[in-house]
Image: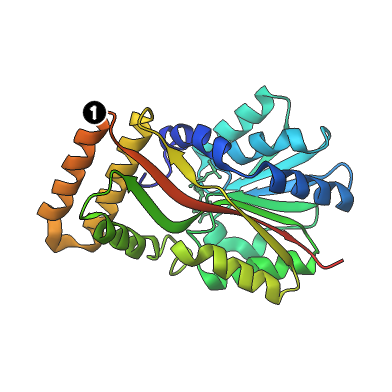
Amino acid sequence: MGGFPLDWLDLRAPQDRKSRSATLAARFAAAVAGAHRPATVLDLGAGAGANALYLAPYLDRRSRWILVDNDPALLQMAQDRAAGVGLAAEILRLDLAADLGSLSLDRAAGVSASALMDLVSGSWFADLAGRCAAARLPLLFVLTYDGRLAFSPADPADGWICDGFNVHQRQDKGFGPALGPSAVSEMARILADFGYRVDFETSDWSVTTEDGDLLREVVDGVADAVLSVRKGDVPRIESWRGRRHAEIADRALSLVIGHADLLALPPV
Ligand SMILES: C[S@@+](CC[C@H](N)C(=O)[O-])C[C@H]1O[C@@H](n2cnc3c(N)ncnc32)[C@H](O)[C@@H]1O
């Protein structure tokens, strides 16, 4: 869960696809189609292209994608995967944290991002929102973590672990202090200030007892994140990790992670 290796993105992709809102995807596609035809959509923090691959069937088949990321290996994979399904996609290597100002919106009919917005800061997001509002672009930001981690069965340390994880989620991920668990409400507030009409749907992950690989990765990611912010509490954190690993091995652990999808439409 730390960083964005391809293995992690591929492990989470099926869960993301199951969880995200088809309704908001369809409404975004309709708004994009109304803006230009054929449409060009920007995918920010595109990774290996999962968001574009999910959204493509909703869009006109002549639509084009600009996949933006700062990781060249992920971008190459995204381009290969897009080509594999006949998607017209170009890649743009850009550090969005440092160089948002150089991102051209000239060709864009819509902007989307998946699993990115809890990493960014409020001021960075306001900058992006202001530029998108000026260009009157529809926006779809999906799978934003909202601060909820609910393990089943519950463990006495869960609340403390979740608090530590959320402290970590607010730390700087390169864009300034991260919005973390407040991302969804802060995005809505900022977008409304720019005149956007904002809708949400929950896109919670429901990770079942049968999803052992994903559960192990999440438990380790959470434990490592808490270790980094509560350095004096190693035994308590490792003991929680050990209990959770034993439950995963017994197919006894399941997990809900709170996420939301957000659609923002410019004023008519
Ligand atoms: C959680 S991953 C999501 C990837 C993809 N959207 C998905 O849903 O599978 C976050 C992505 O943001 C990218 N990213 C993080 N910081 C970035 C930055 N400063 N500039 C550009 N991309 C960045 C990472 O390389 C990674 O691909």
Q: Residue at x 59, y 34 (%)?
A: 78
The foreground one among 27 and 114 is 27
Q: Residue at x 84, y 34 (%)?
A: 62
In which image quadrant can residue 177 be found? bottom left
Q: Quadrant of the C terminus?
A: bottom right
In the rendered image, which residue does mark 1 sit on? 250
Q: Quadrant of the N terminus?
A: top left
Using the image, determine if residue 172 lies above or below residue 93: below
In which image quadrant can residue 7 be found? top left
**Whole-percent x and y of residue 40?**
78, 45
**Whole-percent x and y of residue 156?**
20, 54
Residue farthest to the bottom?
A: 193
Q: Is residue 32 visible?
A: yes
For label 1, the crowd category at 10 Å Cα-Cα, with few meaning under 14, some 14 to 19 and many 20 or more, is few
The foreground one among 31 and 121 is 31
**Left or right position of 72 against 190:** left
Q: Residue at x 17, y 61 (%)?
A: 231
